[in-house]
Amino acid sequence: MDVLNLIGGRWAEGAGAEFADANPARPDEIVARGRFASAAQVETAVEAARTAAPEWASTPYHARAEVLAGAAAILDRNAEEWGEELTREEGKTLAEGVGEVRGAARILRYYASEADRENGEIFPSPRSGENVLVVRRPVGTAGIITPFNFPIAIPAWKIAPALIYGNTVVWKPSSLVPLLAQRLARALADAGLPAGTLNLVYGEGEVGGAIVGHPGVTAVSFTGSTAVGRAIIARCGELGKPVQTELGGKNASVVLADADLGHAAEQVCAGAFRSTGQKCTATSRLIVEEAVADELLARVARLAGDITVGDPLRPDVRMGPLISEAARERVTAGVRRAVEEGATPLTDAAPYTGDLAAGWFVPPTLMELPATGVEFWRRELFGPVVGAIRASGPREALRLADQSDHGLSAAIFTRDLGVALSAVDHVRVGVLHVNSESAGTFPHVPFGGVKQSGFGPKEQGRAARDFYTHTVTVYLGAPA
Ligand code: NAP
C-alpha cells in the first residue's frame, strides 16, 4: 500500500525521499511504501495545525469526544485486518497485533469519556464575594513523535488526550511502521476531525528535529530511546518548551523464595518474550532469591525453550522477529558480549540458521550473569533476552532491582504483602507490578518512568491532562 502524509486536511505524497516498509519476518516483502515529507511540508503542516487551533479549542468537549468515539468504532470494525497489517510491519504475533488495535480503540474511548468528567476546580477565597476558579486551557499545537514498537497504541495514547483537551497535532511516527500510522490518521479524519487538526508527516530524525524546533509547536511529546529523548529534552529546554518523554527501560523482575514459582516463571517469560522483548516495560533483569534460584531458572529456561518462534502470522507462533536487521545485530552482539564477560546461557542462545536466518529472528534467551558489573546489567538491548542474578534475601533483591539508571517498571513475586509494599519505597520506578509481569498498562491510570526512563508529566489516564493543558487561576470577584 502507498501511504500519504496528511497536511492541512489533504492527503499528500511527500516531497522528500522514498521509503519502503519491509516485513521483518520476510524482509523481501514490502508492506507499504511512501515518501517522507520535505522541510517545506513540515512547515505547512505546523502552519495548518496553528491555524486550526483556535477553532478546535473552542469546539465543545462533547463534539471533540464524538470524533474520538467515532474513530474508536472504526478501529474496532477493522481490528482483524489492521491487526494483521501491524503484525506484517512490526513483527509481533497476530494476537498481539489485533489486541493492540483493539487497545488503541479503548484508549480513544477512554479519552472521549473525558467530556463527561469534571474539568477544573473551585477554591474558596478569603475575600468576601469572591471564588477562585482553576480552569484548564489547551497548550496549543503538540508535536508528537512515536516509536516503532506500538505502532498504533502509543500514538493513540498521545494523540487522543492532545485532541480531547483541545490541542491540534503534528505527528511523526517511526518510519519503520508507517502503515498503522496511516490507519489511525485516516480513522480520525474519517470520524470527522476538521482539516489541520491532526497532521501526519513521515520522516526520520530530521523531520522529528524540525517539529521539535518549530516555534509553532508549543509542546513536545516523545516516546523512544533514552539517547534521542535526552537530546529532545535539551532542545526543548533551550527553547523553553514543555516536553514529555517516555524513554528506555532495564526492568527487573524479582522472584522471592515464598512466591508461587510456576506462576512467577510464566509471568517472567511473558514479560521478557512477548512482543519479542520489544516493550519498554519488558523484563530484562531477573533477580531470584538464592533458595529457589535453581528451580526458578530451570522453569524459566524450560518455558523459554518451548516458545515457538517463526512467522508471527501463523497461529501457533508465540514469538516473531525483531524489527530490523540492525536490531538483530544489536541483540546478538549484546548476548555475545555478556557471554564474553562471563554470563552462562541457560537456553540455546546461538543465532538461528536455516529458514529463520532469513528474517530478523533471535532466540528467546535466558542467561545467568556472573555479577552486576557486566554491561548487560546496565544497557537496554530491547530484545528477548533476560539476565539473571541471585540475591541472598528480599532486602538484597530489592536493592539489586533498584540498581539501574533506568526506572520504568518492575515486578515482584511474593506472598508477603509487607515486602511487596516495601518495594514501593525501595525500587524507584514509575510502574510496579506485584505478582504480574513487568509489562502491561491500563489507559485509565498514569504510565511512565523515573530516572532516565522518563521526564515531564506522566502519560495516560488523567495524568495526561497535566501535559496537554495549562491551568488558569481565575480570581472571580463579585461586581462592586
Ligand atoms: P528511537 O530510535 O529513539 O525513535 C523514536 C522516534 O524518534 C522515531 O519516530 C524516530 O524516527 C524518531 N527520531 C529518531 N531520531 C530523532 C531525532 N534526532 N529527533 C527527533 N526524532 C527522532 O526509538 P525506537 O527504536 O523507535 O523505540 C525503541 C525505544 O523506545 C526503546 O528504547 C524503548 O524502551 C523506548 N520506548 C519507551 C516507551 C515508554 O513509554 N517509556 C515505550 C515504547 C518504547 P525513525 O524511527 O523514523 O528514525
Image (cartoon, grey):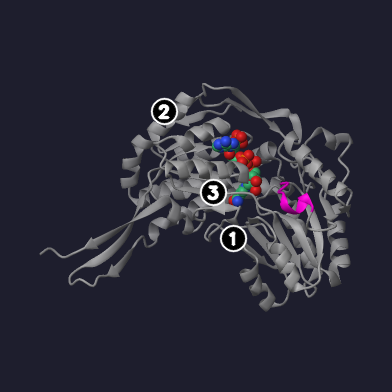
Q: Along the polypeptide, which appears first: circle 2 or circle 1? A: 2
**Camera-nearest residue between 162 and 101:** 162
Q: Seen in the image, is 80 located left or right of residue 397?
A: left
User: Which residue is at a point 75% across and 42% down the rendered structure image?
Assistant: 312
Q: Is residue 80 visible?
A: no
Residue 87, placed above or below residue 457: above
Between residues 171 and 289, which one lies in front from this camera angle? Answer: 289
- Give the crowd class for mark 1: few <14, some 14-19, many >=20 residues within 10 Å: some
Q: Read off the residue under disc 3.
A: 245
Mark 1 belongs to which amino acid? Gly
Magenta part of the chain? 374-382
- Left or right for 229, reference 197: right
Say which mark, if any, is on residue 44: 2
Element type at mark 2: helix
Q: CA distance from mark 2 to mark 1?
A: 37 Å
Question: Residue 325 sits in which quadrant?
Answer: top right
Whether pointer 2 and pointer 1 mark residues with C-beta atoms closer than 8 Å, the reply is no
Q: Where on the picture, by quarter, is residue 421?
A: bottom right
- Tell me the kind of residue under disc 2: Thr
Residue 365 within the segment the image draws in magenta: no
Q: Which residue is mark 1?
A: 430
Disc with the residue nearer the chain's start (3 vs 2): 2
Calculate the distance from the C-alpha at mark 1 to the C-alpha at mark 3.
13 Å
Where does residue 119 sit, x and y in percent of width and height? 36, 60
Q: Position of residue 6 (x, y in %)?
A: 47, 31
